[in-house]
Amino acid sequence: CSHGWHSSEGGSSVWLAFAIFWYILTYGVIGHFLVSASNYLGVDPQVSVSKIRKMSVKRLMRMDENNDGKVSRLEFLRDRLVQDGLVSQEAVDAILKNFDSLDKDGNGALCVKDIKAS
């Protein structure tokens, strides 16, 4: 009979070292595969947002959602998220529509009165 397989004596130290090496190698390969698969499927742990170095009039006009000639922080944020592909325009519009439905007095901010009016 062989030592280590169905015996109470265990294996030799060479086989024990091989088993430890094999476990480390196997878990490392499986971990690398899971990270690679998640990156391939689009789960990106490091989201990249481009930085605007120079503003043009054309870009300013595109960002200006309410056509008042100025770009607010909200308009800038919306444009950057959509242009960098982090969120769709439809998703932003749905979120803002949800905000507007919660803003009962229409002042552009949520407050306790809005919650009590619900």
Image (cartoon, rainbow, N blue to C red):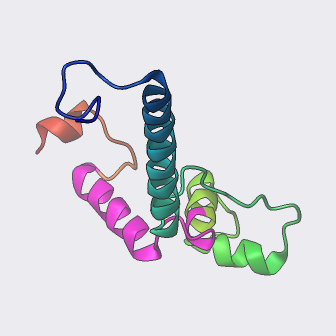
User: Which image quadrant for residue 7?
Assistant: top left
The answer to whether 21 is drawn above or below residue 103 in the figure is above
Please, what is the dominant secondary structure of the magenta stretch? Answer: helix
Residue at the far right: name it. Answer: 54
Whether the magenta-drawn stretch holds residue 70 is answered as: no
Near-viewer residue (24 or 12): 12
Left or right: 26, with 110 as reference point: right
The answer to whether 42 is drawn above or below residue 109 in the figure is below
Near-viewer residue (78 or 115): 78
The answer to whether 44 is drawn above or below residue 16 in the figure is below
Question: Which residues fall within the magenta stretch?
Answer: 81-105
Residue at the far bottom: name it. Answer: 58
Residue at the far top: name it. Answer: 9
Point 39% across, 75% down: residue = 90
Whether the magenta-drawn stretch holds residue 100 is answered as: yes
Near-viewer residue (55 or 12): 12
Residue at the far front: name it. Answer: 1
- List x then y, in percent, for residue 108: 40, 49
- List x then y, in percent, for residue 44: 53, 57
User: Which image quadrant for residue 74?
Assistant: bottom right
Task: Name the quadrant of the N terminus.
Answer: top left
Point 67% across, 58% down: residue = 49
Point 42% across, 66% down: residue = 92
- List x then y, in percent, for residue 83: 62, 72
Near-viewer residue (10 or 47): 10
